[in-house]
Image: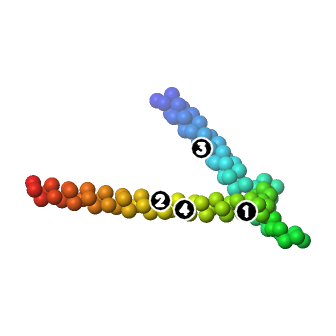
Amino acid sequence: MRRFVLKSILLVSILFVGVLIGMQKANDGIRDMKGYDEDGFGTPLTISEDETGNIEASLLGQEMGSASISEKKKKLEEMKSFNFFSEIGKSVAGAVKSIAEKTVELVSSLI
């Protein structure tokens, strides 16, 4: 009986230490995912305009000029064109669903 209790206590202790290590790893992972150093929180977004009128932005420390901003804007506009195909897909799916439902109703009314 003593061996069983000792083994159980040892197992619970090992699992408890494992949980504590896992919590520490999760905390470190969250800090890495947020994108800041342990020294302090810096500003995540900085937007400035120089004398010539060019807008410069810095997002989480990465410099983004007006050229990269316009590229991202163009990419977003291209993504909106895919919504057209998404709507066509939704309408086709709705039509197939209604046909399947009517077929099932027809077969069930015959039985």
Residue 77 placement (x, y as % from top left): 61, 63
Q: Residue at x 65, y 42 (%)?
A: 21
At label 4, the amino acid type is Ser
Are the two marked residues, 3 and 2, in contact with CB atoms closer than 8 angstroms? no
Q: Split into 4 quadrants, where in the image is the C terminus? A: bottom left
Q: Secondary structure at mark 4?
A: helix
| Mark 1 or 4: the one toward you | 4
Residue named by callout 3: 19
Check contact, mark 1 vs mark 4: CB within 8 A.
Answer: no
Q: Amino acid at mark 1?
A: Ile
**What's the residue at 31%, 57% (across, down)?**
96
Choose the circle earlier in sequence order: 3 or 1. Answer: 3
Give the mark, 3 or 4, whose residue is nearer the N terminus.
Answer: 3
Label 1 neighbourhood size at 10 Å, few (<14), some (14-19), many (20+)? Answer: some
Is 18 on the left or on the right of 38, as rendered? left
Q: What residue is disc 1 on?
A: 69
Q: Earlier in the sequence, mark 3 or mark 2?
A: 3
Q: Residue 64: percent from the left, percent from the top?
A: 78, 59
**The residue tagged with tag 2: helix, strand or loop?**
helix
Examine the rendering and report whether any part of residue 109 can be seen: yes
Cα distance in 3D space between marks 3 and 4: 48 Å
Q: How far across and how far down the image is residue 86, in percent?
A: 46, 60
**Which residue is denoted by mark 4 in the rendering?**
81
**Could you say where residue 100 lies in the image, as x and y percent from the top left?**
26, 56
**Which quarter of the picture shows residue 70?**
bottom right
Q: Which tag, 1 or 2, sits closer to the chain's start? A: 1
Q: In whole angstroms, how far apart are the C-alphas of marks 1 and 4?
A: 19 Å
Going by the picture, which residue comes out furthest to the top? 3
Of 3 and 16, nearer the camera is 16
